[in-house]
Image (cartoon, rainbow, N blue to C red):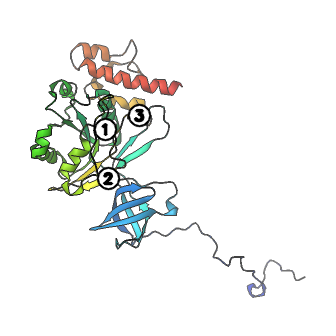
């Protein structure tokens, strides 16, 4: 048998090709510097619809991204066939850094956070003034998620022909949140649509609300050329709506420079992903009152300075009640 020492001549060494005669693996990945920029419009069972320049392109996530998932609103880099023709498929090879993220969990006991929308400028919280009845605590939870994710909130109150908006607006008067009040007649005439559009022009706005509040109907009015298949009907027994939007969808705002993102109706908005110490930031009318709180105050204990702050008339007691309800829910989750 021929033996080789330390200094062998490479020409003398026989190399046996691999069984499959393939090149060895490498950790070096292509940079895809020539990749095209795109915007994710919707996601459906692993297929992503993207806007590349003026073309709608179907794509899938490249294997090299691993578990990193793209969501509606993401700015992505694509390679492959981007003609937009039928039966063509591009690959998403990079997800650009996000400027904002709207997250939620199914409930406060759910450890799995879901990214709903990326890169939105504001969150339009749509709620009906009647049929179904408004749910202020759900609005508060949406506000917490908006502030935590870097989105500015907008209140859109629908069905003002069935109930006046003043009582609900009083709860949020100190927050300085912009709002729009609409009625069904105004939606049909287009008067309310123009008022809402003024708040959306030049921005990316995600719409959120529980079923039956008229969220998708409003989106249809804002984007008439992209009608959704159906609108919801309120259950006469439960007062709850039926889900009609099954996945988030980004649509260009008609008659303006902006985007509207319609999201599925929610029955709950879990905040398990939000650090409890950051919840107070969603209540700027209460936050100054925490300066006198003891260290690591839970804001639901006898020494909490918020009681005196509210008693002095600086904020509405209902706001403190909403804050403490959220914090109590978080504490029960952590103690389980």
Residue 41 placement (x, y as % from top left): 33, 57
Residue 173 placement (x, y as % from top left): 18, 27
Would you place residue 329 above or below residue 271 in this image? above
Question: In the rendered image, which quarter contains the C terminus?
Answer: top right
Q: Which residue is mark 2?
A: 249
Question: In the rendered image, which quarter contains the N terminus?
Answer: bottom right
Residue 107 falls in image quadrant: top left
Residue 195 placement (x, y as % from top left): 12, 44
Which numbered disc flags the more N-terminal residue, 1 or 3? 1
Q: Which residue is mark 3?
A: 271
Which numbered disc flags the more N-terminal residue, 2 or 3? 2
Residue reaching furthest to the front: 236
Residue 319 falls in image quadrant: top left
Q: Which residue is mark 1?
A: 211
| Crowd around label 1: few <14 · some 14–19 · many ≥20 (10 Å) | many
Residue 307 appears anywhere in the view: yes
Would you place residue 209 above or below residue 251 in this image? above
Residue 188 falls in image quadrant: top left
Residue 59 placement (x, y as % from top left): 41, 64
Q: CA distance from mark 1 to mark 3?
A: 19 Å
Which numbered disc flags the more N-terminal residue, 1 or 2? 1
Residue reaching furthest to the bottom: 11
On the rendered structure, is 94 left or right of 170? right
Numbered disc in front, either 1 or 3: 1
SS class, disc 1 = loop
Q: CA distance from mark 1 to mark 2?
A: 16 Å
């Amino acid at each position: 048998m021929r033996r080789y020492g330390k200094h062998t001549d490479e020409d003398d060494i026989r190399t046996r090709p691999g069984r499959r005669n393939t090149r060895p693996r490498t950790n070096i990945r292509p940079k895809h510097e020539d990749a095209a920029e795109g915007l994710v419009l919707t996601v459906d069972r692993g297929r992503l619809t993207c806007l590349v320049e003026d073309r709608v392109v179907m794509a899938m996530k490249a294997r090299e991204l691993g578990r990193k998932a793209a969501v509606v609103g993401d700015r992505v880099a694509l390679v492959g066939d981007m003609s937009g023709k039928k039966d063509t498929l591009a690959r998403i090879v990079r997800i650009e850094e996000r400027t904002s993220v709207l997250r939620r969990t199914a409930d406060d006991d759910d450890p799995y956070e879901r990214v709903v929308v990326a890169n939105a400028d504001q969150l339009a919280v749509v709620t009906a003034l009647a049929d179904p009845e408004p749910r202020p605590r759900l609005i508060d939870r949406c506000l917490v998620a908006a502030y935590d994710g870097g989105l500015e909130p907008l209140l859109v109150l629908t069905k003002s022909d069935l109930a006046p908006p003043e009582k609900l607006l009083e709860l949020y008067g100190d927050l300085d949140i912009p709002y729009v009040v609409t009625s069904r007649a105004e939606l049909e005439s287009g008067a309310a649509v123009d008022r809402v559009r003024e708040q959306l022009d030049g921005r990316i706005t995600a719409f959120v609300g529980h079923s039956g509040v008229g969220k998708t109907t409003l989106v249809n009015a804002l984007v008439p050329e992209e009608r959704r298949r159906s609108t919801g009907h309120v259950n006469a027994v439960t007062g709850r709506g039926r889900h009609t939007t099954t996945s988030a969808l980004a649509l260009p705002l008609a008659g303006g420079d902006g985007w509207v993102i319609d999201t599925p109706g929610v029955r709950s908005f879990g905040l398990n992903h939000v650090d409890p110490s950051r919840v107070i930031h969603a209540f700027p009318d209460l936050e100054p009152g925490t300066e006198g709180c003891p260290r690591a105050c839970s804001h639901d204990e006898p020494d909490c300075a918020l009681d005196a702050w509210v008693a002095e008339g600086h904020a509405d007691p209902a706001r403190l009640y909403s804050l403490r309800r959220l914090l109590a829910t978080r504490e029960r989750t952590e103690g389980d």
